[in-house]
Image (tube, rainbow, N blue to C red):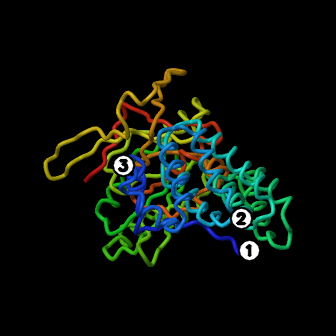
Amino acid sequence: MNDMREFALAPDLLPDAEAVNAFMSEGMPRFAALAAHFGLEHDPEGALQLGIALQTYARRDTEQAARALKAFAASESRLPALGRVFEVLYKAINSGFRSASTFWIQLAVELYGEHPQVPEAQRLILEFFTYFGLWNHALSVHSLLPAELFDPWRRHLMLGRARAEGFQPKHRFSFVLLTWNRADLLDRCLAEIRAKAGSGDYEILVGVNASVDHTAQVLERHGIERVFWNQRNDSIDYYRVLFAAAEGNTIIEIDDNIVELPRGFDLTLERHLTVFPEHGYIGFQPTRLDVMSGARSIMRGAPDEEYLPIEREGLTLYEGPTWGCCAAITKRDWLDIGGFYGLRMSKTIGEEPQITRKLRLRGREVGLVHGETLLKSY
């Protein structure tokens, strides 16, 4: 119990959110495999309770889901499996409904209340609150636990809260990019950033995922000083390194295959974050460029009817799923939500749903800016 352990998704059975959602929509035909994943092959009652919880949660019946999960957790022998259940429900699935925030906090508190002396329950609840950056909740639970067993947690929690509360930016903006063997696209993207940034007070951080092309020469030509060389390709999980290292007040992530940015894109995103403070993560709606045919098409994160237009001070923000192609969050907000702790991100489990989920737990939303040219090459 002296080591802090992070949950890790099992890539063989649960490679992405779509796989879990498929089970939750298809039901029992897929249940045997999922029960095996949770180690419940010889616990049919627990498997049934878990199946009810998963599928009622998918139907947004959080009251029934909570009853089923608490019935499942009534047996302390199932608590290790419950850790994996939490991992699936609040990390792999971006359910998108606001009541999920209240649901998870209430459920975590009630589960701890029912198992206050069980180490696995204690660790599970601590990790839950740590994942979401709910420092005060975690410290309240921690204060009731044996100090000698959980001292590493206390240090981590105190440090996380201190980083969020004490952050002092050195720049107005931090532009963060990840790249892997796309030197020519990266060259064009960096040139576009230099040409279109509205503020001169920015830094550029580039994470290089084991590229073997001429990326180094491109970075040298553009004078990029903050380069993070990764010896392997960690895909978008390497964002955790870049976001943590960013020293700007506002972090703007930019895909390396962006070939056209709106003029003053940084100032536009900053203004929207200011005018719509209840929205903590805002991006541009991108346009896809097919380099083979030259065709362009709007990229939609969800059907248009799922977006809520909000007008204020001459601006319009479309509240709804947000693309991370060129999107902004303040560094203080990113620290406050606990960063990317607790999940290895991939192209199928991206940074957008992680940020969205954690912001919603604080009553914050996300949204898109329409009508600006953001061209993404494929």
Residue underneath mark 1: 1
| Residue 145, percent from left and from top | 84, 63
Kind of element beneath mark 2: helix
- Residue at point 47% right, 29% down? 317
| Residue 221, percent from left and from top | 38, 66
Horizontal side of 125 relative to 144 (left or right) equals left
| Residue 352, percent from left and from top | 48, 49
Q: Nearer the viewer, mark 3 or mark 2?
A: 3
Q: Nearer the viewer, mark 1 or mark 3?
A: 3
Name the residue nearer the viewer: 354 or 56: 56
Residue underneath mark 3: 26
Residue underneath mark 2: 123
Q: Earlier in the sequence, mark 3 or mark 2?
A: 3
Label 1, label 3: how many angstroms apart (C-alpha)?
A: 38 Å
Up/down of 59 relative to 170, above or below: above
Which three-letter amino acid code belongs to the residue tagged 1?
Answer: Met
Quadrant position of residue 244 = bottom right
Name the residue nearer the viewer: 133 or 175: 133
Horizontal side of 338 relative to 47 (left or right) equals right
Label 2, label 1: how many angstroms apart (C-alpha)?
A: 8 Å
Q: Quick check: can you spot residue 190?
A: no
